Amino acid sequence: MPSRFYAKKARITQRVIPHMFLHSFATHLLERGTDLRYIQNLLGDGSPKTTEIYTHITTKGIEKIVSPLEHLDI
């Protein structure tokens, strides 16, 4: 199916190219907690650096990050 079909289905009014779906797919997986290495494999990227370019890193969920130091019994 052409990207226009999916854009219309998602109610996106701006011009959409297939590459945008790739960015969105990777970003949503990352935001849902999927490991970057799995995303790299799904996208067929040879390098993690390439995958990082596709994924728009967001601050969503950053407040849930716990320092490894918090797990030490000191």
Image (tube, rainbow, N blue to C red):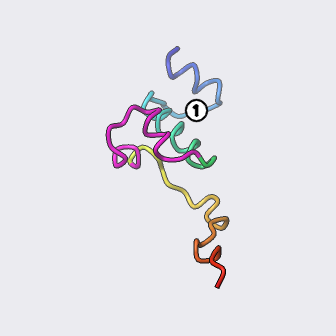
Q: In which quarter of the image is residue 51?
A: top left
Query: 1 or 34: nearer the eye?
Result: 34
At horizontal 57% and vertical 45% (from top left) the residue drawn is 34
Residue 16 image point, x, y percent: 48, 30
Residue depicted at 54% across the width and 57% down the height: 58
Furthest residue to the bottom?
74
The picture places residue 59, in percent across and down from the top left corner, at 57, 61
Q: Nearer the viewer, residue 58 or 40?
A: 40
Q: Residue furthest top?
A: 1
| Three-letter amino acid code of the residue under disc 1 | Thr
Query: Is 50 a magenta residue?
Result: yes
Graded by Cα atoms within 10 Å as few (under 14), some (14 to 19) or many (20 or more), the crowding at tag 1 reads few
Q: Which of 8 and 60 is in front in this view?
A: 60
The main secondary structure of the magenta stretch is: helix
**The magenta stretch spans which residues?**
34-52
Residue at 64% across, 29% down: 10
In the depicted structure, whether residue 45 falls above or below residue 67: above
In this picture, residue 72 sits left or right of residue 15:
right
Identify the residue shown where x is 41% and y is 49%: 52
Where residue 62 sits: x, y (%)? 61, 64
The magenta stretch spans residue 9? no
The residue nearer to you, when weighing 39 against 26, is 39
Where in the figure is residue 65, as x and y percent of width and height? 62, 66
Quarter of the C terminus within the rendering: bottom right
Query: Under tag 1, what secondary structure?
Result: loop
Q: Mark 1 points at which residue?
A: 13
Give above or below for 51 relative to 43. below
Q: In this view, does 8 lie to the left or right of 36?
A: right
Along the horizontal axis of the image, is 39 left or right of 68? Answer: left
